[in-house]
Image (tube, helix red, strand yellow):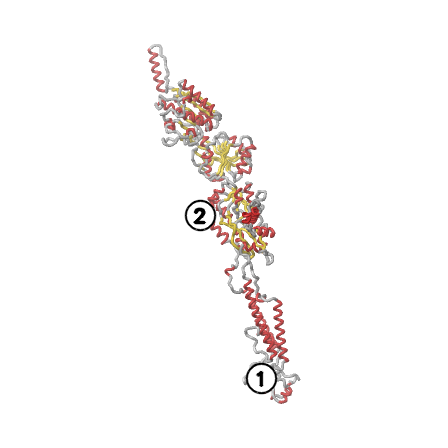
């Protein structure tokens, strides 16, 4: 209780009166000094700022009599490991206090966490001692104070220290910069045990929180390398300036490139120094409010409050002072119970905690004492929880720090952060803030396989295709960049007999790749060592690719119906028959030319000279017919024989032409996998190391295993005759289809690349055909871009395509969400349409269904050429005839009467040459006797007839 100063007055009345006046004067100006036994100050080992701050508070109160407060406390140093020893020490101090009738008003607890903090919380909660704690932890982290009743919540109070609030800035940075991965390194100046779950809770950021390896530089290098192997490129360092320097000097120079970001966060107010040659980091440090700097400077200079960090020292000073003033205010106002019960440690039975009727929380929040660094942000609403939500509010300066040559050459403030549980950053320079963001760059390995992946030097990444468009769409949603390169062996990944992988799968297993991109099938054995996203493409099976059958087109294809020797024989028969007919007509006495008088009255008078015989045999082969037949019987027999020959030849030619054109349109003999397996003329094989090869190899192995099982059962001597008879069959009960096919594939030699397979298909002949078995998408694209290739049969062994990532990678969930988003927006369908239906590389081919059933001009066009050749020859002949009759001396046709009346002496002209005219016909006995063989063609001409020549 308050003890007033007692003055003993002696002497005369003057001195008594003077003394009374002096007392009244002093009492009016100076408050009475009150002395309280506040209680216990329990501090953790090595928490020097708290210990120093409480000592400064006691000195501060003594020197500032205006507070009218003198405090007596019992200090207890808490060890961090042995709860029993600590509890005994506290109970002994507490028992001594009760025995001396110096009941504690308050327990000031500055333990941070762990065993010491839990021990103190258990002690104060069990005995019902009013406590103000500065332990680390948010709501629910103080396990011993987790389920306090309403009365205990009024006197068991916790105010979080700055070291517990500063890590919350990481949450604000992650949200602001949309960081997807983070490694948080901390030293002993921060307590992060309770932050593992709560710090980035409900934020999709993959993170690791771990203590800095303090053993040495090598250990720190290994620690950072392990974190990098977890695909982390955003690093946060929580610690003092010395810890930040050690970490930065343990980092490889490559980890300061654009795809990495470093953030240093400290409670100290100094600057970071490091031996790095070139590094740019974000540096955050606290700074006192302007209005409190004078008070802080006074405490540092006058009261020696210089323990680092200053932020922590100021916090503990303000908290202790506020706590002591709260007890004073409660005692003076009568809010402190006069008959307060105190229970000894030995008397506690587990449920006999004294009931307290005091509201420490109300008076604590009403204290208006100025602070020295920041302001207390205390929960004042009665129904709201106090513990885990009350703290000291201050600001942290956000700087861009450039380290060159071992020193900080440039430091620029780009924003601030006000300490709080969910306070956003206040940014002054957005551009600088973006430059501090680590570019999320993933390493992609792929296999070139159109149209999924194709090389294109003009493309931004050097590649184009369906998968490139897909990964760009995903990158726009997930926000990352990537580098892409082809895997060296050009394979997606297969496991050998030793259990080792190759291709993209090996890159993912060895952490050399983040993403495997391409037409990569989801297979059970691959899912054991890597992860796949949801499928981005429909189920794709294996199908057959063969050369498209094409009949060679020729303008003179109608001539190829018969072989060359047949045509030559027909030609020889034509000339021989024509010659024979001319001979028979020449020598037969019944022919027209040898029997003119007999046939002089016939309308058709035809003399079968050699020219007429050739014409007759030629026209006899046409529907027009040969015209008048020979008069003699022998000639007619030759003509009839020729007609029969021509009928047979024409009929045979017509039938063969139709059959020839029909055979050229027949489909390929292989229409399914079964057809391919049953024949031996066409070789077939998949790509070496492909999923198709794996399928056939495994199917063959499975058949062999089933056969061995059946054989072992059949030859098992332990079976009864009845059981053995049930297994006895003449044929194998297990098919060996794939076993034979796999053997045939090995004999045919598996192509190493797709280009090699396509070349072998194109080089197929009737004698050495080749069929390629591969993924349906690859084969359909080859068919789309090449007119000489075709897909045969239906797909089988269908599997989906998906993006491969490392096992346990966070990218799996992010990519799954992105792919499903694209699927809902129908973007995947648009990509299919772009790269299959609207692809510029699509070949313009004649589709079989578009072809008519008629004969094409390419096969029958030679007939028109024959017409043009015939017309051309006729034109040449006409010119020749004109020239012959125009420029050569030709016989002149004159009238017979004119010739008989003229004097024969005039036959010769004056030059002695024959006249130009020659008599073609005359009459008279003399003339008829001398020219018996010459007969006039016409007896007379019309009066209007005029000779042309």
The relative height of residue 887 versus residue 795 in the rendered view (above or below) is below
* Residue 626 on image: x %, y %: 57, 76
Q: Is residue 915 left or right of residue 6?
A: right
**Nearest the eye: 805 or 773:** 773
Quadrant position of the C terminus in the picture: bottom right
Of tags 2 and 1, which is closer to the observer?
A: 1
* Residue 258 on image: x %, y %: 52, 40
Q: Is residue 700 left or right of residue 153?
A: right
Query: On the image, numbered disc 2 is attached to which residue?
Result: 824
Q: Pointer 2: residues within 10 angstroms few (<14), some, or many (20+)?
A: few
Total numbered labels:
2
Query: On the image, numbered disc 1 is attached to which residue?
Result: 600
Q: CA distance from mark 2 to mark 1?
A: 100 Å
Q: Secondary structure at mark 2?
A: helix
Q: Is residue 419 visible?
A: yes
Q: What's the residue at 53%, 58% (across, down)? A: 845
Q: Is residue 934 left or right of residue 427?
A: right
* Residue 849 on image: x %, y %: 50, 60
């Amino acid at each position: 209780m308050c003890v007033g100063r007692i003055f003993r007055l002696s002497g005369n009345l003057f001195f008594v009166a003077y003394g009374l006046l002096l007392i009244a004067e002093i009492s009016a100006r100076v408050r009475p000094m009150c002395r309280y036994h506040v209680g216990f100050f329990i501090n953790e080992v090595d928490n020097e700022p708290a210990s120093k701050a409480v000592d400064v508070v006691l000195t501060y109160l003594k020197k500032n009599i205006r507070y009218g407060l003198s405090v007596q406390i019992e200090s207890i140093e808490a060890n961090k490991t042995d709860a029993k020893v600590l509890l005994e020490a506290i109970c002994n101090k507490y028992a001594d206090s009760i025995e001396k009738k110096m009941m504690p008003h308050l327990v000031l607890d500055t333990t941070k966490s762990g065993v010491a903090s839990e021990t103190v919380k258990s002690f104060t909660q069990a005995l019902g001692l009013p406590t103000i704690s500065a332990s680390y932890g948010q709501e629910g982290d103080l396990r011993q104070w987790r389920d306090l009743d309403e009365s205990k919540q009024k006197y068991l109070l916790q105010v979080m220290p700055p070291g517990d609030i500063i890590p919350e800035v990481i949450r604000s940075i992650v949200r602001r910069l949309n960081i997807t991965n983070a490694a948080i390194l901390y030293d002993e100046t921060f307590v992060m045990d309770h932050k593992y779950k709560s710090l980035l809770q409900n934020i999709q950021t993959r993170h690791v929180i771990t203590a800095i390896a303090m053993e040495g530089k090598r250990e720190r290098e290994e620690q950072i390398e392990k974190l990098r192997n977890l695909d982390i490129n955003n690093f946060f360092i929580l610690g003092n300036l010395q810890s930040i320097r050690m970490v930065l000097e343990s980092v490889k120079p490559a980890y300061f490139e654009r795809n990495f970001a470093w953030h240093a966060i400290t409670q100290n107010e100094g600057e970071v120094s490091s031996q790095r040659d070139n590094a740019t980091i974000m540096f955050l440090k606290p700074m006192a409010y302007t209005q409190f700097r004078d008070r802080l400077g006074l405490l540092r200079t006058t009261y020696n409050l210089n323990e680092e960090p200053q932020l922590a020292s100021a916090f503990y000073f303000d908290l202790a002072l506020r706590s002591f003033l709260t007890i004073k205010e409660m005692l003076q106002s009568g809010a402190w119970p006069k008959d307060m019960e105190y229970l000894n440690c030995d008397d506690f039975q587990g449920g006999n905690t004294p009931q307290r009727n005091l509201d420490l929380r109300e008076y604590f929040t009403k204290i208006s004492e100025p602070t020295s660094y920041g302001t207390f942000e205390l929960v004042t609403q009665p129904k709201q929880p106090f513990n885990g939500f009350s703290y000291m509010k201050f600001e942290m300066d956000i700087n861009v720090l450039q380290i060159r040559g071992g020193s900080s050459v440039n430091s620029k403030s780009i924003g601030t952060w006000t300490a709080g549980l969910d306070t956003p950053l206040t940014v002054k320079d957005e551009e600088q803030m973006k430059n501090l963001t680590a570019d999320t760059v993933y390493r992609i390995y792929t296999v070139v396989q159109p149209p999924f992946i194709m090389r294109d030097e003009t493309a931004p990444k050097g590649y184009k295709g369906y998968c490139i468009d897909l990964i760009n769409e995903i990158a726009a949603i997930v926000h990352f960049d990537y580098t892409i390169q082809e895997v060296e062996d050009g394979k997606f990944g297969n496991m050998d007999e030793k259990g080792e992988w190759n291709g993209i799968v090996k890159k993912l297993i060895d952490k050399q790749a983040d993403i495997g991109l391409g037409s990569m099938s989801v297979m059970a054995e691959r899912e054991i060592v890597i992860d796949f996203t949801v499928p981005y493409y429909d189920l794709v099976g294996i199908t057959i690719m063969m050369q498209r059958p094409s009949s060679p087109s020729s303008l003179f294809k109608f001539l190829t119906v018969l072989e060359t020797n047949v045509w030559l024989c027909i030609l020889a028969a034509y000339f021989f028959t024509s010659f024979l007919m001319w001979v028979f007509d020449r020598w037969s006495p019944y022919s027209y030319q040898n029997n003119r008088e007999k046939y002089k009255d016939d309308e058709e008078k035809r003399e079968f000279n050699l020219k007429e015989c050739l014409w007759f045999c030629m026209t006899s082969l046409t529907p027009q017919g040969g015209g008048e037949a020979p008069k003699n019987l022998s000639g007619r027999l030759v003509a009839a024989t020729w007609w029969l020959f021509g009928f047979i030849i024409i009929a045979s030619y017509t039938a063969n032409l139709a059959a020839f054109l029909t055979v050229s349109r027949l489909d390929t003999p292989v229409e399914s996998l079964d057809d391919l397996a049953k024949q031996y003329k066409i070789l077939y094989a998949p790509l070496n190391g492909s999923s198709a090869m794996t399928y056939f190899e495994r199917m063959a192995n499975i058949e062999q295993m089933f056969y061995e099982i059946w054989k072992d059962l059949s030859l098992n001597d332990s079976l009864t005759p009845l059981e053995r008879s049930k297994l006895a069959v003449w044929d194998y009960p297990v098919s060996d289809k794939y076993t034979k096919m796999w053997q045939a594939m090995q004999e045919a030699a598996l192509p190493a690349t797709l280009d090699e397979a396509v070349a072998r298909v194109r080089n197929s002949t009737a004698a050495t055909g080749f069929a390629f078995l591969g993924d349906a998408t690859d084969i359909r694209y080859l068919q789309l871009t090449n007119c000489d290739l075709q897909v045969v049969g239906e797909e089988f062994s269908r599997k989906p395509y998906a993006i491969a990532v490392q096992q346990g990678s966070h990218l799996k969930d992010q990519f799954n969400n992105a792919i499903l988003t694209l699927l809902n927006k129908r973007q995947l369908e648009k990509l299919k349409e772009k790269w299959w239906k609207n692809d510029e590389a699509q070949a313009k081919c004649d589709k079989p269904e578009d072809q008519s059933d008629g004969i094409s001009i390419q096969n029958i066009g030679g007939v028109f050429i024959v017409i043009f050749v015939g017309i051309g020859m006729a034109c040449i002949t006409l010119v020749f005839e004109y020239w012959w009759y125009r420029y050569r001396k030709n016989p002149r046709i004159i009238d017979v009467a004119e010739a008989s009346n003229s004097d024969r002496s005039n036959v010769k002209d004056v030059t002695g040459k024959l006249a130009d005219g020659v008599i073609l016909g005359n009459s008279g006995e003399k003339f008829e006797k001398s020219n018996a063989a010459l007969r006039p063609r016409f007896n007379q001409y019309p009066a209007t007839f005029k000779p042309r020549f």
